Image: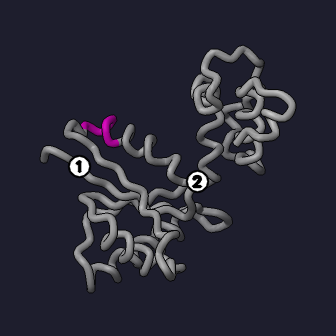
Amino acid sequence: MKELCYTLLSDGSSDKALMPILTWLLRKHQVECAIQSTWADLRRLPKPPKTLLPRIISSLELYPCDLLFVHRDAEKEPREKRVVEIQEAVEAVKKSVAVPPAVCVIPVRMQEAWLLFDEAALRKAADNPRGRQPLQLPDIAKLEQQPDPKEILHRLLCEASGLTGRRLKQFS
């Protein structure tokens, strides 16, 4: 295999942030060929599918791949329930479409919690890699217990940016 193409089907556009992590994991597990990654953007379809089964079908039709990552947040459900949900949908899709190997991606807490431990990465993401503003990162042992990791991530990115006033208000 000279190239591995994977598609990430996720709950929302912010979940594209998982793609570098998935690519890194593939590399860590000895995938040595070129890796092409694609996020299944179904938002632009005239009638975007709402449920998992038609979303998988649309993803495979529009974004053919060798490996399909299916992301679902655990939210208030146990991880195991989401795994079963994805596996059942993939099995149902196999009755009508060729399906490559599928991998369940189920963060127990919002993925933003995973991004709160790397100060250098936060500064780079805030476009201020040489910033010196002190950042109050949460305790790594308690990351998955944070009630709103998205808010914490946004606050840390604002701090890391070093921006003030109007520029800070415009920071995205």
Task: Report the residue that reaches farthest toward the left.
Answer: 1
Answer few, some or many: residues within 10 Å of disc 2's Cα (few below 14, many 20 plus, some between 14 and 19).
few
Secondary structure of residue under mark 1: strand
Q: Is residue 108 visible?
A: yes
Q: Which residue is mark 2?
A: 14
Q: Which residues are magenta?
A: 26-30
Identify the amino acid type marked 2. Answer: Ser
- Residue 119 position, x and y percent, is 64, 25
**Residue 19 to residue 84: above or below:** above
The residue positioned 63% from the left and 15% from the top of the image is: 130
Left or right, residue 38 beside residue 82: left
Q: Is residue 171 magenta?
A: no
Mark 2: secondary structure: helix
**Residue 71, placed above or below residue 90:** above
Query: Which numbered disc, 2 or 1, marks the residue that appears first in the sequence?
Result: 1
Coordinates of residue 109 in the picture (x, y in percent): 64, 53
Amino acid at pointer 1: Leu
The residue that appears at 73% across and 41% down in the rendered structure is: 154
Vertical order, 70 against 146 (above or below): below
Q: Quadrant of residue 165?
A: top right
Colour setting: one colour
Q: Main secondary structure of the magenta part?
A: helix
Task: In the rendered structure, find residue 4 and report the number of the disc placed on it.
Answer: 1
- Quadrant location of residue 138? top right
Q: Residue furthest front?
A: 166
**Residue at image coords 37%, 42%:** 23
How far apart marks 2 and 1 lie (CA) works out to: 23 Å
Image x and y of residue 135, in percent: 75, 24
Q: In percent of the image, x 38 and y 37: which residue is there? A: 24
Tell me, yes or no, if residue 117 can be seen here.
no
- 157 or 44, which is in the foreground? 44
